[in-house]
Image (cartoon, helix red, strand yellow):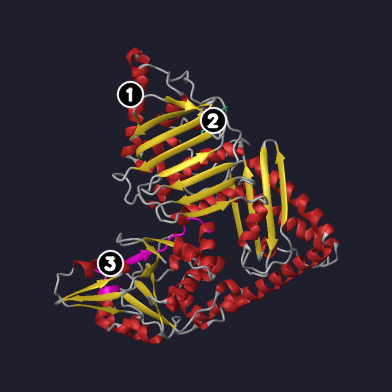
Amino acid sequence: MTDSTTLTSDYTAASIQVLEGLEAVRRRPGMYVGGTDLKALHHMVFEVVDNAVDEAMAGECDHIEVTVLADGAISVRDNGRGIPVETHPATGRSTLETVMTKLHAGGKFGGGGYKVSGGLHGVGVSAVNALSSFLEADVYRDGHLWRQRFERGIPIGDIECVRPLTADDERGTRITYAADPTIFEDADVRYDALRHRLREMAFLTRGLTVRLRDERQSPALETTFCFEGGVRSFVQYLNRERVTLHPAVHVEREVEGTQVEVAWQYTDAFVENTYSFANTIVTPDGGVHLTGFRAALTRVINDYARKAGLIKDADASFSGDDTREGITAIISVKVPDPQFESQTKVKLLNADVRQHVENAVADAFAGWLSENPREGRVIVEKCLTAARARSAARQARDLVIRKSALESSALPGKLADCVTRKPENAEVYIVEGDSAGGTAKQGRDRQFQAILPLRGKILNVEKARLDKILHNNEIRALVQALGIGIGDDVDLSHLRYGRVIIMTDADVDGSHIRTLLLTFFYRYMPQLIEAGHLHVAQPPLYLVKAGKTKTYAYSEGQKEALVAAAAERTNVSIQRYKGLGEMNASQLWETTMDPVNRQLLRVSIDDAAAADLTFEMLMGSEVSPRRRFILTHASAVRNLDI
Ligand code: 0RA
């Protein structure tokens, strides 16, 4: 390796470039990992894991272990080929050091050249290095253990050969780093967030074992994922609490260097659950691979239904929507040179991939249907019902919309509207129950705050079609109050309130109602969420009285802190609020509605896949996944895990 006393001027220039590069990352972390928040913190972990998954996709690695160490540092060990350690011709330094210090070095260095790589993150592990207080790389390769340490991205000494490998040492790489606490707002990764993505990675890389260990608590938390079934297992997992109509159909094929893997399965549900991925990265906006899948599905089902005599020549064809009702599908492609529409909203553009997916799915599905006529009939019947229901829903929706337009007052009777007509100033509180609704009406500032009380539980929209949903009075009131329509014809320009705020009790029932509402908005007015209009209000959990001081606490931790901070001998009393109804109007205003004091959480959906799993889990009985639903804050006060 290069001795520091024999520096050439070339090397000096290269090293200045490196320092400037690392400095740029530290100055503008947003450009490289998307910010300095929790999401960015997790992005760092996935950036390192992606490199190991690339090795797996190249067929060189079948085991990845991610450990959160007791002090919060992260360690990622894989059994791939190991980052090359020999001198790199372009820099005169080891390839390891080059990969760790040069931006965008990544897999292109070292000559290995991946066929496929999780390209999107692609900022390279050097960005992680630059944003870490320390990073240590251990490489088990060429018969030796090699090590190099970096601090804030800068090498602390040269790469060293630690010792020869023993029979017990597996080849590969271990990267251990600590995210720099002076850069990240919160340097504590969340186990559930890591688990979610690592599970997804394992589904999308068939046969790869991914282990996650969290040593911050004792005993350590641990999960291992390995799915021999690949995306078929993914579909089965997504449908684990649904009633399925047949075993999942699966196809895997490689065409011109593109790997296509798709699985799908119909359920008795009324909604579609399709997720597409390119090089293991979720593509929330779909793209060519999704288009290809949908085209194949519609074509094959229409052909089959006609040939099998299940629909007559005179009958209209099924629309795409008809053939997708109740389907759960995963479309995964691995493309050597993925073209994405943009860095953030991901959509795959490679034109030839569409045909590859369409052909693979069409061949597999047509073959499967001819071998499984009983299941074929069930699927066609499902499409027929969907087509009929869709036309009934259209009529029902037209009726509701026409009715609300014709009625003297198109607004629901129980809405207490605000005075202002300017949506940008107006807000509506959706309140659970008439009594809390009454308190909120008294407590509000009627100039800009409207109150819509909903009685009891609203309909679970996952379990009903649009025509039935529109018969539900609570939902009708909601639709009329917001003014933007529902489903396919949502038009945000008619939104009557810039802020739509869900206000429910801080108990189990309240959280259930909130979930039902979120599910409704997610399924039928996603634009409202995407544009940042939907919020959740935060009523306090406790009133802590210490002597003459009264303070509201919004979390257990805050309550504990207030009690601990109270001076000795002071009289401390704690009042727990279970429901909004326990507060009087002025307390409700002060704690939950006054823009000066309240804590509003803006609801965001990062990607449909995560959101859907979230809703599904919130609906289900599992307790710990509930905590994973993360809302980002509007008032920049704090985050909430429901
Ligand atoms: C460059 C080239 C080769 C492998 C790697 C990088 C590599 C990087 C990471 C990061 C984490 N784990 C990794 N494993 C491998 C190919 C080397 C060859 O051809 O032997």
User: Label 2 is placed on what type of residue?
Assistant: Thr
Crowding around mark 2 (Cα neighbors within 10 Å: few <14, some 14 to 19, many 20+) is few
Looking at the image, is mark 3 or mark 2 earlier in the sequence?
2
* Side (left or right) of 485 relative to 101: right
User: Label 3 is placed on what type of residue?
Assistant: Gln
Towards the viewer: 92 or 350: 92
Residue 324 to residue 188: above or below: below
Towards the viewer: 415 or 217: 217
Give the Cα separation between the discs numbered 3 and 1.
47 Å
Residue on which the image places disc 2: 166
Region of the chain picked out in magenta, as a range: 591-608
- Residue 556 in sight in this render: yes
Residue on which the image places disc 1: 16
Q: Position of residue 612 (x, y in %)?
A: 54, 62
Give the Cα separation between the discs numbered 1 and 2.
38 Å
Give the Cα separation between the discs numbered 3 and 2.
52 Å
Q: Quadrant of residue 272?
A: bottom right
Looking at the image, is mark 3 or mark 1 earlier in the sequence?
1
Residue 360 colored magenta? no
Q: Are marks 3 and 1 in contact (CB under 8 Å)?
A: no
